[in-house]
Amino acid sequence: QLQASGGGLVQPGCSLRLSCIASGPTFPNYDIGWFRQGPGREREFVAGIRWSGGYTEYADSVKSRATISRDNIEKTGTLQINNLRPEDTAVYYCALMPAGRNTLSTRSGYGIWGPGTEVTVSS
C-alpha cells in the first residue's frame, strides 16, 4: 500500500526529496510518519504530519533542515531534507497511522509501512 522513492547517493550539503505514494481510498484518514534506520542503529522518528496537514513534528536532528508535506488528493507524502550530513545516511521509511491514534513520533502507532528507500550521504 505504500511505496517510497527518492533515495540515492548525495554529497554532504545537498538536498534530497523523498516521496511516499499510497494506494487505497482512505489515505486522508491517516497521519504520515517518516522514520529512518542507520547502520547499526535503531529505527528512529524523523518527521510526521497529521491527516489534515495542519500539524507537523520533527526530530531535533532534522528540525531546522527538513520539511514534511502531503497531498491528500494525490495520496502522496514528501520529506525534504536540506544540508544533508553523513549522519543522515539511513534507510528511510514512510508509514501511516490512523489519524490521531498516537503522537506522531510514536513508532508503535503506525501499522502500515513502506519498504524503505536508501539514502547515502557521502563525498
Image: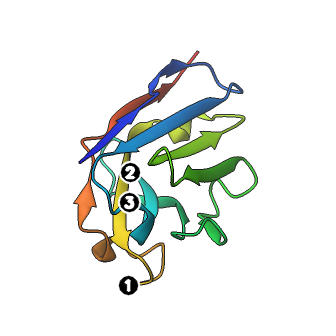
Crowding near pointer 3: few (<14 within 10 Å), some, many (20+)? many
CA separation, marks 1 and 3? 15 Å
Q: Amino acid at mark 2?
A: Cys
Q: Are marks 2 and 1 in contact (CB under 8 Å)?
A: no
Label 1 residue SS: loop
Between disc 1 and disc 3, the foreground one is: 3
Give how far across and how far down residue 100 sits, in percent: 45, 83
In the displayed structure, does residue 87 sit left or right of residue 114?
A: right
**Residue ID at (61%, 63%):** 58
**Residue ID at (45%, 61%):** 32
Q: Amino acid at mark 3?
A: Phe
**In front of the other: 87 or 23:** 23
Q: Is residue 71 above or below residue 109?
A: above
In the displayed structure, does residue 27 sit left or right of residue 17?
A: left
CA separation, marks 2 and 1? 17 Å
User: Looking at the image, is mark 1 or mark 3 earlier in the sequence?
Assistant: 3
User: Looking at the image, is mark 3 or mark 2 earlier in the sequence?
Assistant: 3
Label 2 residue SS: strand
Instruction: From the image, tell me which residue sits under label 3.
Output: 27
Q: Is residue 97 above or below residue 113?
A: below
Instruction: From the image, tell me which residue sits under label 2.
Output: 94
Give how far across and how far down residue 9 sits, in percent: 48, 18
